[in-house]
Image (cartoon, rainbow, N blue to C red):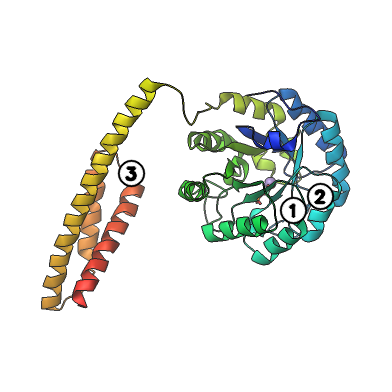
Amino acid sequence: MEQTMNANTNINEVFSKRPLIISGPCSAETEQQVVETATRLAKTGKIDMLRAGIWKPRTRPGSFEGIGTKGLPWLQQAKKITGLPVAIEVATGKQVEDALHFDIDVLWIGARTTVNPFSVQEVADALRGANVPVLIKNPINPDLELWTGAVERVAKAGIKQIGLIHRGFSSYGNTEYRNAPMWHLAIEMKRRNPEMMIINDPSHICGRRDILLDVAQKAIDLDFDGLMIESHIDPDNAWSDAKQQVTPEKLAEMLDTIIWRKEDINSEEFHAALEKLRQQINHLDDELLQLLGQRMKIADKIGEFKRNNNITILQTNRWNEILQRAFKEGGKVGLSKEFITKYFDAVHMESINHQNAIMNS
Ligand code: PEP
Ligand code: MN
């Protein structure tokens, strides 16, 4: 990774750096905490941008709700000392105005704001005419249309540099993660917006520091453009999100441990080998599709059979038997139960649709 940018660095240059690493406390607490965090982060030479929450959307009232506008000059001060550009979360028009007034370099829209089109529109209206990059976190619920809608609202306000932050999705009773990553949704968002930067926020996915590295590595393996990870000079005593924060030095250690992948390399040998494997995958996919087509033809026959004898399509016992067989056979060739369940759910639904068409024809 390159060295930290100096004070005159143009924000466009920072924004296009890969991997882009953003770090800083969940919340700005005191001037001393912001400046010391920034200084220690800058000293590692591994950070491109400082983050800090000024207004904190908290699930329950009574927890620390952010220091407010008075923290903005602290960020200016941290930027002056370290040269690191600064990023904060905005959720209202007034917050956008204040942030721009205090020369905040990058704004982000938080997960609890992305869910609400009224709020996103208010933020977008306040952004009109501003020349500031905006990062948009996924909504707390797994809905790509809401995420896309937020991107469209901000783009319509004339913001040219828009990036995405994948911070996971909330679900009741999830124990491993604070917010389930649901990687397939981030991958789909990336597929829909190939030119748009997407970074991963392991802190809010994990909610605890012991698994940050695993999630960060997975994001890099999936070709994310960067990471936003919370850091604090005294993580255990942080005023918000204490369990998931790490010291600047611990973060630097983590960044050193990550295996940074390239999307591509200039080697004919590598490309030839990869191409060969991809051809094999294509052949197998073709075969699978042929087989699935055959399977559906048989389902059609069963449908006719059931129609002629006037019996129900869904036969719960049979469905259980199919799944149990698949777990057993699939397990032998290294397929997870989770995958088999999803796959057979989809195949079974398609079968039911086929039979439905026959039964009612
Ligand atoms: C944050 O970044 O501190 C934050 C509140 O994140 P999210 O919007 O992902 O919950
Ligand atoms: Mn946080």
Type of amino acid under label 1: Val
Q: Are marks 3 and 2 in contact (CB under 8 Å)?
A: no
Q: Position of residue 102 (x, y in %)?
A: 86, 46
Q: Are marks 1 and 2 in contact (CB under 8 Å)?
A: yes
Residue in the foreground of this view, choosing between 68 and 173: 68
Up the image or down, 299 lies above or below 243; here it is below
Judged by depth in the image, the label closer to the viewer, 3 or 2, is 2
CA distance for labels 3 and 2 = 47 Å
According to the image, label 2 marks what residue?
99
Report the side of 209 relative to 4 (left or right).
left
Instruction: Report the Cα–Cα distance between label 1 and label 2.
Output: 8 Å
Foreground pick, 227 / 202: 227
* Residue position marked by numbered label 1 in the rendering: 90
| Mark 1 or 2, nearer chain start | 1
The numbered mark, 1 or 3, whose residue comes first in the sequence reads: 1
> Mark 1, residues whose alpha carbon is within 10 Å: few (<14), some, or many (≥20)?
many
The amino acid type found where label 2 is placed reads: Ala
| Picture quadrant of residue 201 | top right
Quadrant in the picture for the N terminus: top right
Along the line of sight, the residue nearer the viewer: 220 or 206:
220
Q: Determine which residue is flagged by label 3.
A: 336
C-beta proximity under 8 Å, tags 1 and 3: no
> Under tag 2, what secondary structure?
helix
Residue 27's place in the image compared with 152, above or below, is above
Q: Position of residue 50 (x, y in %)?
A: 74, 37
